[in-house]
Image: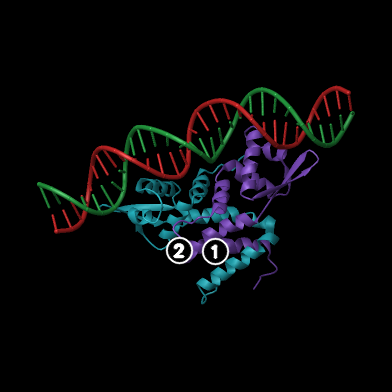
Chain colours: A cyan, B purple, C red, D green
Amino acid sequence: MVVDQSPRLDRVFHALAHPARRAIIRQLSGGERNLSELASPLRMTFPAATKHVRVLERADLVRRRVVGRQHLCRLRAAPLRDATLWTEQFRRNWEARFRALDELLDEMKSEEQPRSRRR
Amino acid sequence: MVVDQSPRLDRVFHALAHPARRAIIRQLSGGERNLSELASPLRMTFPAATKHVRVLERADLVRRRVVGRQHLCRLRAAPLRDATLWTEQFRRNWEARFRALDELLDEMKSEEQPRSRRR
DNA sequence: TTGATCGACAACCATCTGGTTTAGTATACC
DNA sequence: GGTATACTAAACCAGATGGTTGTCGATCAA
């Protein structure tokens, strides 16, 4: 494989590369939102905001369902996982430098579920 | 914070969004390479390839040192860590969907260092 | 010193991005 | 019915992106 051809990853990383789209993701991590709710905190017009949502949809980071006149959006976790796994694969070769990351992730894991340690 | 203003993350995710640049990163995960080595497997001209390297440098994913007429590039892990941490922060809200990721990461961790389990 | 190699730089081009404004459709509400 | 609300779609624009070709400088090696 000469070049890492993966249009899916292209779209995911590209979607994450804009602050407005990361802000949308952050909002959606709190649950479903309609387009007006997503657009209002962004410093741009409504059509511009919906374009960003569309970019997130193309990356499959967001799915929408239509309820009446509202378009409710929700976050999809799988592409975030793919992005993480891509970066994580280099940890093998860069272990020393990544040691701090391991500890951070372990902290996050234990903060989030202090009761049930898996494995 | 209205919008997730972080030009550093912008640059990192943008750098990761092109297959040629991911291929360069993959090559560099095997150790230092000069520009010719990085460019040759890519299906494009040399100047195009060096532009991609420059994008990676702007994201601080790559640093170069000049030795004679060769420019040796090496990977920097910190920005990859930042990217991972950004996506990981949503795992709290999407735990069930991310459970599979935890297991995969644990597998990678144990494959890579089967002897010393930290913590 | 000559030639080959490694790389920078500039100019150019097509396409994509990220924003706007304007106009239009469909649903909900009084 | 009439009006506000939620959203789409199209046209337009400036600037960024991703590629090319051509020219040049510096270093290594014979």
Q: For mark 1, does the 10 Å Cα neighbourhood hold few (<14), some (14 to 19), or many (20 or more) residues? A: some
Quadrant of the drawing holding the C terminus of chain B: bottom right
Which numbered circle lies on residue B82?
none
Report the residue marked by disc 2.
Answer: B94
**Residue A84 in picture, x, y percent from top left:** 55, 56
Residue found at x 78% / y 38%: B69
Mark on residue B102? 1
At x 58% / y 46%, what residue is drawn? B15
| Label 1 close to label 2 by CB (< 8 Å) | no
Classify mark 1: helix, strand or loop.
Answer: helix
Chain identifier of the residue bearing label 2 in the image: B
In terms of depth relative to the viewer, which is nearer, A103 or B101?
A: A103
- The answer to whether residue A84 is above or below residue A9 is below
Q: Chain of mark 1?
A: B
| Residues behind callouts 1 and 2 on a single chain | yes
Q: Position of residue B94 (x, y in %)?
A: 45, 63
Identified by mark 2, the residue type is Trp
Which class describes the residues within 10 Å of circle 2: few (<14), some (14-19), or many (20+)?
A: some
Q: Nearer the viewer, residue B115 or B78?
A: B78
**The disc labelled 1 sits on which kind of residue?**
Asp
Q: Is residue A78 visible?
A: yes
Residue D5 lies left or right of residue D20; in this view the side is left
Quadrant of res D28: top right
Query: Vertical placement of A63 versus A99: above or below?
Result: above
Q: How far separated are the C-alphas under marks 1 and 2?
A: 12 Å
The reply, left or right, for residue D9 in relation to residue C7 is: left
